[in-house]
Image (cartoon, rainbow, N blue to C red):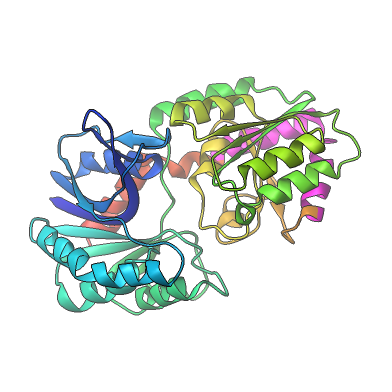
Amino acid sequence: MTLAIISHTEHYQNPDGTIVGWGPTISEINHLANAFEEIYHIAFLHPGNPPPSSLPYISENIKFVPLKPVGGNGIEAKLRILGNIPAIINTVGKTLKKVDIFQLRTPTGMGVFLIPYLTFFSNKKGWYKYAGNWNQTQPPLGYALQRWMLKNQSRKVTINGSWPNQPEHCLTFENPCLTEKERKEGLLITKEKSFELPFTFCFVGRLEDAKGVQRIIDAFGALDSLENLKVIHFIGNGVKMDSYKAQCKALNLPVIFHGFLNRDEVFHIYREAQFILLPSDSEGFPKVIAEGMNFGCIPIVSDISSIGQYVNGMNGFLINPINEFRLRELLQIVLSKNTNNLYKMASDCYLGASKFTFPYYISKVQKKIIKN
């Protein structure tokens, strides 16, 4: 069976000609390649140098189909999207003729016109992956429109979490991010992880206020004492990085801003850290939470979307309401917790990450989508 994947994943070309793309998505596709004879990935090819988080395809049965990058903020960027609609649809249509089944990854700017195109002009078997917050009460207009279209059609849709009145064709799927080898290593790391003070924290994601970076700085900066804090690792990049660095310096916070790191380097920090922070405004279910939990990192995360269905009082700390004051209260609780209690929470974290393996995901795709 052959598969076409349509996504907004950023790709780049290395000087040696190798195509690389956003690591988490490429990892997922590399593992999906074991279940299909051939995969075509239609996505954007950007100019410039790839970030360290990029990965290459490792299987010869994966074919990259480039699209001219479109999108961005402002009227001019939106008009460029409109101008590229015919070219995008043409590329999608040609590729669909080569495959047995497709996956469209949403929400994305292209989804606004590709969902109607696939719904009304293609009889190809396929499914949609909605990676955002399925239960968001006030999503952006484009997200709301895509979610409405996905709720009201016949093809399968995989979503984060399980919800009341969930349509029958909308299937709860975990976001895969772990290999069996990483699960075995995570067990060893979790068993040996120390929860003696001082503690190490990490944040992995875009460095922006919406992801909670400012909230982290403000909460730690308001603590009465920093003696139980060893270091906060910030992994990622963003336009406000210099501002965040200056604030941390003024507050004497022990931080390291790493910028983008590759997967192995991120996992090295998971092995060292006791806690992973993600006090963001909106999420689906970020893979970094499951990755950190696999290595015994106790999550301190926003109580939004499906996160609370996997993180609870036994294996982590949910931020609700989502503000710096509640985060500071949780940090004070964390820094005064009994060592044995924290070790038990870390063990429960490891167990909770079991559903986020690639083999588990591929098995669900085969049973619930392909065979149906």
Tell me residue 248's x, y (percent): 75, 38
Q: Nearer the viewer, residue 332 or 87?
A: 87
Q: Residue at x 14, y 66 (%)?
A: 90
Q: Residue at x 77, y 53 (%)?
A: 324
Q: Is residue 173 magenta?
A: no
* Residue 60, quarter of the rendered image: top left
Q: Nearer the viewer, residue 172 or 27?
A: 27
Q: Residue at x 13, y 58 (%)?
A: 95
Is 347 drawn above or below residue 28 in the view shown? above
Tell me residue 181's x, y (percent): 40, 26
Q: Nearer the viewer, residue 26 or 218?
A: 218
Tell me residue 31's x, y (percent): 29, 39
Majority SS type along the magenta span: helix
Question: Is 366 placed left or right of 309 in the picture?
Answer: left
**In the rendered view of the protein, which quadrant contains the C terminus?**
bottom left
Question: Is 163 placed left or right of 58 in the picture?
Answer: right
* Residue 21, quarter of the rendered image: top left
Query: What span is in magenta?
Result: 325-351
Tell me residue 296's x, y (percent): 61, 32
